[in-house]
Image (spheres, rainbow, N blue to C red):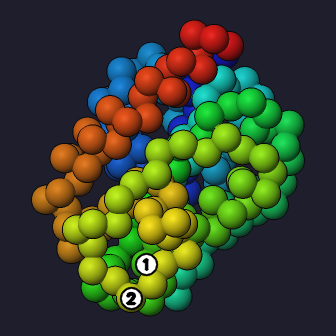
Amino acid sequence: MAKIGLFYATDTGNTRKIAKQIKKRFGGDDIQLFDVAKTTPDAMLDCEALIVGTPTLGDGELPEPLAEFLGQLDSSHLHSKPVALFGLGDQVGYPAEFVDALGITYKKLRKLGAHLIGSWSADGYEFEKSKALHDGAFVGLVLDQDNQADLTDERLDEWLEQVKPELLGATVAG
């Protein structure tokens, strides 16, 4: 049984790279990576906690494999599991749709009753609007590899420090 399943969609490979960095920082045995284009939501059933990552494409769209994956989910895949989210976007090129796919993912998972954790401050980003903003904060970690790649390591470390206890706590309690 995977302790923590990290499910991600990728387009250019950046989200896959971040997923691998999260796995490495977390400790290799705690996390198993799942490319949503190559798996089904049933893989979540064997996980005690979840991380879901997505890039935002074009005018704020989900990658097609993630849209299909989310369409197959039901509440049994998420039952009583903490779920942390991360998203990649381009705040300069797409300031009016910045990390919208993260917000779309959040909305779908929340509707299914997921226990969502890991909100992230919007400080340090410059954008017009985002579907990933909820009560003044992002619904998960936000990374901009196009314009702020130099901040990625620091942001990853800070976010993982925030979510790791709850994700690992689920694996101990589970």
Quadrant occupied by the C terminus: top right
Q: Position of residue 72 (x, y in %)?
A: 84, 54
Q: Which amino acid type corresponds to the residue marked 2 in the rendered image? A: Glu
Calculate the distance from the C-alpha at mark 1 to the C-alpha at mark 2. Answer: 8 Å
Check the image and report above or below for 99 versus 139.
below
Residue at 52 percent of width and 88 percent of height: 59
- Total label count? 2
Check the image and report above or below for 79 versus 125.
above
Residue at 64 percent of width and 54 percent of height: 37
**Is 37 on the left-hand or right-hand side of 89?**
right
**Is 113 on the left-hand or right-hand side of 149?**
right
Circle 2 residue? 128
Q: Are marks 1 and 2 in contact (CB under 8 Å)?
A: yes
Does residue 44 show up? Answer: yes
Residue that extends furthest to the front in the rendered view of this protein: 135
Residue that extends furthest to the top in the rendered view of this protein: 172
Q: Quadrant of the rendered structure where residue 50 is? A: top right
Residue at 36 percent of width and 21 percent of height: 27
- Residue 98's tag is 1
**Is 35 on the left-hand or right-hand side of 145?**
right
**Crowding at label 1, few (<14), some or many (≥20) Cα neighbours within 10 Å?**
many
Given residues 136 and 49, the one toward you in this image is 136
Quadrant occupied by the N terminus: top right
Given residues 127 and 147, the one toward you in this image is 127
Q: Quadrant of the rendered structure where residue 141 is? A: bottom left
Q: In the structure shown, which secondary structural element does the residue marked by tag 2 occupy?
A: loop
Residue depth check, mark 1 versus mark 2: number of the one nearer the observer: 2
